[in-house]
Image (cartoon, rainbow, N blue to C red):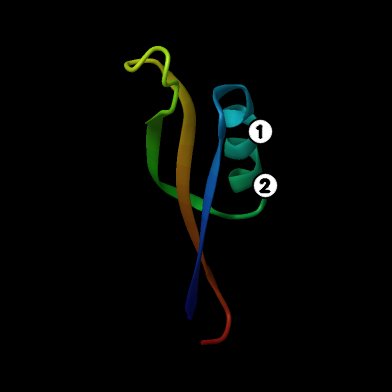
Amino acid sequence: MKIERIIITGSLDEYKNAHEYCQENGFRIIQTNPCLTDKEHRNRITSFEIVAEKETEGG
């Protein structure tokens, strides 16, 4: 078996769509990270990063 890994980043508004994409395509989310990208408000979480993987045939 081979492991396929994807990393999805986006704004918080896109998080739900990214999560649904992983579920619909057989990816298991292994890590979710908030990202601090707003330079004006240093402690404001404005985006996310999802790391997901699934096993595939081949290798």
Q: Residue at 41% across / 21% down in the picture?
A: 39
Counting from the top left corner in percent of width and height, residue 26 is at 60, 55
Counting from the top left corner in percent of width and height, residue 33 is at 37, 36
Q: Is residue 36 left or right of residue 24?
A: left
The residue tagged with tag 2: helix, strand or loop?
A: helix
Q: Which residue is mark 1?
A: 17
- Looking at the image, which is closer to me, 13 or 52? 13
Spatial CA span between label 2 and label 1: 10 Å
The kind of residue tagged 2 is: Glu
Q: Up-down: is 12 above or below 17? A: above
Q: Up-down: is 58 above or below 42? A: below
The kind of residue tagged 1 is: Asn
Q: How many marks?
A: 2
Q: Is residue 30 left or right of residue 59?
A: left
Classed neighbour count for the residue bearing mark 1: other residues with Cα under 10 Å, few (<14), some (14–19), many (≥20): few
Residue farthest front in this picture: 40
